[in-house]
Structure formats: structure tokens, C-alpha cells
Image: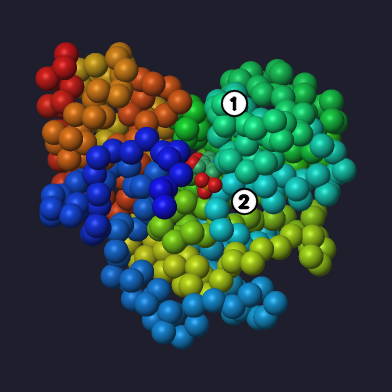
Amino acid sequence: MNLYDVYSLFDITPVKGKGSYIYDFKGREYLDFYGGHAVISIGHSHPHYVHKISAQLQELGFYSNSVINPLQQVLAGLLEITSGLKGYELFLINSGAEANENALKLASFYNNRTKVLALENCFHGRTSAAINVTNTASKHQAPINHGIDVTYVHFEDEKKMIDEIRSHQYAAIIIEVIQGVGGLDMISADLLDKIQIECEKSKTILIMDEIQCGYGRSGNFFAFQESSIRPDIITMAKGMGNGFPIGGILINARKMPPVKSQLGTTFGGNHLACAAGIAVLEVMQMEDLVENARAMGNRIKQLLHGLPLISKIKGQGLMLGAELEINAKIVREKLIYDHHVFTGSSHNPKIIRILPPLNITDKEVDIFVNKLETTLRSIS
Ligand SMILES: Cc1ncc(COP(=O)(O)O)c(C=O)c1O
């Protein structure tokens, strides 16, 4: 049987990972500054993570959401402590798109509206509502995905954004504080504060999509924590499980109290997924990874300034984009095939996306910057 051929693949076959490195079947070492698409938060095969998942598997890998699973409560408690957020309730699912799908549904349940406000260049996933409110993937939208009336606003167009919210038409506004796929543009903390005020007045649900920029990657636990807002819903996935499929939504349950069977999932929040999620948060605390992401991000930014062909550095923490004067494809290919360094791309073809594990050290930053500099000099 053939695999359904929807991915453009690099000709590399990783079989092992350790820390910030992955290894192919010939034992060749690759520095991972892509983090498997912003997923690897605590590093590949972290011993605590391996131990926790293996131990859980010996006990109980899965049972459905029809029984009490105390691990879900442990995860929720750790999340509250690590994020510093109080007054939210946790619903667990399996992926980012599913998180946004459920968030949009809850918003519509709350105010009975169907329109959504989103940002130009946003990406929110590939399931029906999520892809419908995504602005960077029109070719991935099938006719069946066009059910929602969406308005897209530029991330700096304060007037339009506020005017639209004031129209009282929208079920929700959905925002990535740092756009991932879109190209690392960031909405300002000041504008977020204003949006929150207008959302409150108009009963519009404020959804922060923290699927990529959350879980420590921005140098705050959640990227919106640079502002003083309290979103109604926060969506999470990627770094939450360090590769184990798990997603979650944090809900202001005073505003949107739970209704039995309104949301549900077979696999979401299963025992093994919770063990992975708990291990990630424990390591984040033990190794102070949010602070490390901030410090290493600042160091990368400093070192990249002044390198040839780099025109701008965008983003924050370990979610950075180096914007080049040329198309980034050739640079990324040289990095991966000649220097064995993984990086990411974005909707903006000139951007190299930098998304390493949150526990990288000065040494790995220096290796990355040296290899990038050598590559850029060989082209310029
Ligand atoms: C900001 C954002 N939201 C949602 C998603 C969708 O997540 P998933 O691929 O887990 O469905 C992504 C994936 O890249 C993302 O970056």
C-alpha cells in the first residue's frame, strides 16, 4: 500500500533524538532548530519524560473519558502553577486544530453568533472551522470548509479591528500573538488590551491561539502575558506534549460554564497523554525553561544582527524569524544538507523560522549562528 502523498519531504530519515539533536539511520547528527515544527519543548528523549511515559504505560495507557482520570487533574494543577493563570478550567483534546475547533464552538454556544474576526496571515489548523478562519491556506480549503463568515484584519489596523468588534456581530476574535506560519509578526500588547475591553462590551469571545507561541516558547508561559489581558479561551497543543499528541483549551468557566456532553473526545486527555503533559511541565519547572527561552532568544537576536543578507529579525524568545534579502529556501537547504541544521519556513518566503527546543544552551546557539553565518557568506 502507498502512503497518501501530501507532504514535500526532505531526503532525511531520523531514527533517534537526544536533547537538541536528531540522528539519521547512518548516525549523522542534525542540530534541531525547527523543533519538529515548534513541538519539541523539553528536548528529544528527555530522561524524565521517557521515564514518566514508560512508567505510565506499565500501569494503564488508555481509558475513555467515561471514568475518573486523576492524571487530568494533576495536569490542570501543574498548568495553573506553571502558567500563573487562575480561574480557568481545562478541556483536553489531541491537536491544535481540534483545540481551535472547540474554542470557536464554545464561543458560538455562548453568544449564539456565527461570524469570526481573525488576523490577516493567520493559521489556525486544518479542520473545518479552523481552516475556515485561516488566511494562509486558501488552497487547502475545500468547498465544505466555507461555512463561516470571516473578516480578516491587518494585525496593526487598530481602527478596523475595534470598529468590527463594536459591530456586535462576531462570535469570537481569534489571535496568535506571534504569527507562526504567517511569518512572525506580533500584535502589540497595547492593542490586545484595547481588544479585550471591546470584546467585554460586545460579548465577543476573545480566543488566544497559543498553539505555537505558548508553553514557554515566547519567553513568557503564554505570549499574551506580555499584556494584561485575560482571554476568554486559550488554545494549546504543540509544546504541551513534546511530541506526544495532546492539546488543550483553557476556558473562563464563569463566563462559559460547562454543559454536559457539549464537548467531547475519545482519545483526548488519556492516561498516556497526561503522563507526557505532566512530564513536560515538571521539566519546564525544574529547568526554568521559560526563562531560558527568553535568555537564549535574546542571545540569538543579538548574534544575528549584522549577519549578511539578514534584513530583519522578528518574533520573541525561541520563536524567531530571520527575514532575508533573498528567498530563504536555498539557505535552508544548504543548512540542512551541508551543515546538518534543521530550520523552519513560513508563508513569507524570505523568512527562516527558528524554533529550537526550549532547553538549548549557549553552545548550541553558537553552533547555529556560526553555521548560518557561513551559509549566508557563501551566498552573498
Ligand atoms: C498557531 C497554530 N494554530 C493551530 C495549528 C494547528 O495545529 P495542529 O497541526 O496540531 O492541528 C498550528 C499548527 O501549525 C499553529 O501553528
In the image, what residue type sits under mark 2?
Glu
Toward the bottom, the furthest residue is: 59
Toward the front, the furthest residue is: 1
| Residue 64 in picture, x, y percent from top left | 63, 75
Q: Is residue 56 left or right of residue 271?
A: left
Residue beneath disc 2: 98
Residue beneath disc 1: 138
Residue drawn at x 12%, y 27% as measured from the top left: 374
Residue 244 in sight in this render: yes
| Residue 151 in picture, x, y percent from top left | 72, 24
Residue 225 image-quadrant placement: top right
Tag 1 secondary structure: helix
* Location of residue 8 with respect to 62 vertically, above or below: above
* Location of residue 58 with respect to 253 vertically, above or below: below
Q: How far, Cα to Cα, is label 2 from label 1?
A: 19 Å
Q: Is residue 136 left or right of residue 281?
A: right
| Residue 1 in picture, x, y percent from top left | 41, 52
